[in-house]
Each structure stands twice: as structure tokens, then as C-alpha cells.
Image: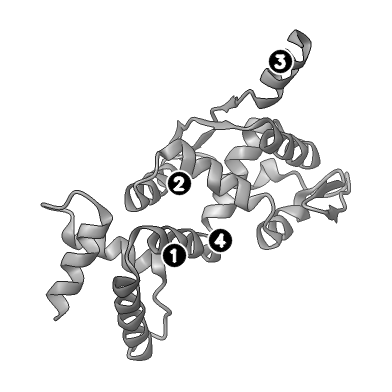
Amino acid sequence: MLKEKLRSTRSDKKRDVRPTIPVTLKECIYRISYITNTPVKDVCVDICEAGVVSKKVMEHMSVYFRRQIWLDQTLYRGDLANASIKCEIPAGQKKERITMRFSQRSFENIRALGYALDVTPTTAVALLLDASVKNSDFINEYVRIFLSKHVDEGRMRELKQVMTFINKNNPYEEQISWSAITSYIVDEMKTGTSNLSQSINGWLDKLK
């Protein structure tokens, strides 16, 4: 019985990872954290867990795979002749550490990714964060799901109508995303509001 409890404890143990990432990326993650009112460490884990099973993100990174791996039931082939992803890391950027904690299962995916890229798990996390955050589809969906959970249906319908109007009448031929409009609302209503729901309500009321 004691051995079973010890095994259970070890399997559930969280793994701390503290990658060094560009300050600009860290600021972006903190902004996502602020917008969604979610702790930074949880946002980082969400980004990595979604990124490592995203075909779009993995296809982008797989050109640097030097060993083959299975991720989310997909086999990615590697080749030792592939360029090292380390060569793609910009030099001279100001960097800072960021901390997150992975479940053992998620960490195994991170370790497998590091193995394929021929880098440490910590470096793999830094690269994965960068690749995933730059995937606008992921960020847009992340914010949309958060809004659907924290904003009532009536307000969500109003927001969708506003976005439809903006995109239909946008002279710049650019699609306004959930993350972009939410970021704008937060900036507009930051003073005197305590949460995102209040910011959205206040912003929509101003349009009436």
C-alpha cells in the first residue's frame, strides 16, 4: 500500500521549468495573462500543451527535428543532417526567465520534443513558447474560449456583431481577431475596472 502511494505521488509530481525567453515574448505572455485573468505560469503551460499537439506549430518546428518522435499520434521524422534550431535563436536579444510547472505527462512531451530537436527540455520550452505564441490561430482561440466562459451569452453576441461590423467595413483588409479586440477593450477601459467582464460591459455600453 505504501509503495503504491509513493508511486502515485511521484507520477503526479509537477516538474518546474524555468526557460530564458526574449523580454518581448515574456511581455506578450504577461499581457495574455492580464487579459484572461489567468496566472502567468498557467498561461505558459496552456500555451506549451496546446503547441506540442498543434500540427501547425509542430510542422513549423519539425524542419529542425534531428530525431524522429511520436507526438499526439503523429510521427515526425528527423534527420541528423537538418539544421540545428539553435542557429535560429536570435543573438543579442534581452532575455529574462519565466517559471512554469508541468504535469509529468506534459513534461514527457516536452522532453520528447527536446530530444527531437537535440536541445534540453528547458530550451525546448523556450522555443515552443515562441512558436506557439506566434501562431495567431492558437492565441485567438485561447482568448475566445476564455471569453465564452466569463462573459454572458448576450454580451458575446454583441461582441460578435461588433467584430463582424469592423471586419466587414475594415479598409485595411485585415481580420480583427478576438485577441486583438479584447486587448483593445482592456486598454480602453483599464482605469476603474476590476475585471475583463466589467471592461467589456463598459466598452459595449459606450457604443450604444
In which quadrant of the rendered image does the N terminus lie? top right
Give the image location of residue 46, x and y in percent: 54, 46
Tag 3's secondary structure? Answer: helix
Front disc: 4 or 3: 3
Front disc: 2 or 3: 3
Q: Earlier in the sequence, mark 4 or mark 1?
A: 4
| Mark 4 burial class by Cα count in 10 Å: few <14, some 14-19, many 20+ | some
Q: Earlier in the sequence, mark 4 or mark 2?
A: 2
Residue 155, quarter of the rendered image: bottom left
Residue 102, quarter of the rendered image: top right
Residue type (three-letter) at the residue carrying disc 3 = Lys
Give the image location of residue 69, x and y in percent: 84, 46
Say if mark 4 contacts mark 3, CB within 8 Å: no
Give the image location of residue 178, x and y in percent: 40, 68
Which residue is identified by label 4? 135
Residue type (three-letter) at the residue carrying disc 2 = Leu
54 over 20 or under it: above or below: below
Looking at the image, residue 152 sits to the left or right of residue 42; the answer is left
- Alpha-carbon span between mark 2 and mark 3: 40 Å
